[in-house]
Image (tube, grey):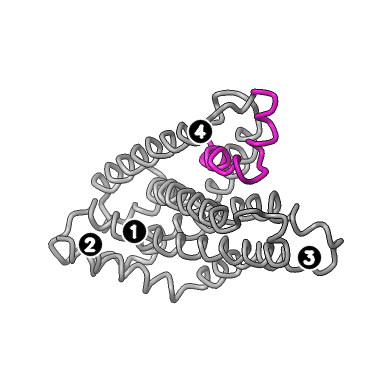
Amino acid sequence: MKSQLWLVALFGLRHMSGARKLVIAALLALLPAGLVLVVRWVGPAGAAAEILQSGVPNLCLAVTGLLALFLGCGCMRDLLEERTLGMLLTRPISRGRLAFGLLLSAMILSCFLAAFGAALSFAVSSVGVHADVATPAPEAFLLVGAILLLAIVHTTLFALIGLRFRKSTVLGVVWLFVVEAGLGSIPGPARILSPIAMVECILSPEFTTRASIESADGEYAVSPVTALIVLAVMQTILLVLHQRRAARMDFLSANVSADGP
């Protein structure tokens, strides 16, 4: 069964590797490092430390959301609309395992691109400012680890949206703007619904994010441990919903591309 799961994941990776959206995803992953390079080139000499402290983490968080949106929504939705799932369903594999294998392929790709982009951005921004940063290595690991967490949760979320709705990309963009950018910027307990807001709480001890700015007023009092627990619970719920949705779907039906139960 595990071998079947990895075969499906490899199939999904191969399918996404041949898609144009992979090129867009790769360019998105390199966007923070490119912007940091431009700012350091044209900006004042003393701006490097500030870029490393606040610019890099916030850029990487935003880009990771877009990466997960591109890859998560399409990991199964594209195959549904192309009617290519029949070949996989000829093998003795459950719908849930099939959907999880395709989710795994999107998760591997989004995690790799997001982590690589974050590490490259940190490297570009930290060159020449080691004197201002006492321990750059732990900060780099913290940034990459937090970005990996966000990529996992967001990819699962957008894959679930892709299973449920035909216009999944549009709904994913709405989620990023309404929940992540909107609700995630409003003080109060409702911010736990925003994965990016929780990841900001994990980064706030070392980096300047919305969490670190507002925590001075006591309005964003979520500890990194609490944020980790919230993300773990969120990921568990999303996986359960993802598997339940996949188990109820008829992937060969003519109506799979339509919004419906």
Q: Which residue is mark 2?
A: 5
Is residue 169 positioned above or below 19 on the image? above
SS for tag 3? helix
Residue drawn where x is 60% and y is 40% of the image: 204
- The circle drawn on residue 40 is 3
Read off the magenta span: 192-218
Where, quadrant-wise, is the C terminus in this rendering? top left
| Circle 1 residue | 104
Residue position marked by numbered label 4 in the rendering? 193
Residue 82 position in % (x across, y down): 38, 66
In magenta stretch: residue 180: no
The CA span between labels 4 and 1 is 23 Å
Q: Which residue is found at the position 60% from the left and 23% from the top? A: 188
Residue type at mark 2: give it: Leu
Residue 195 at x, y = what percent? 51, 40
Q: Are marks 1 and 2 in contact (CB under 8 Å)?
A: yes
Q: Distance from label 3 to label 4 (Cα)?
A: 34 Å
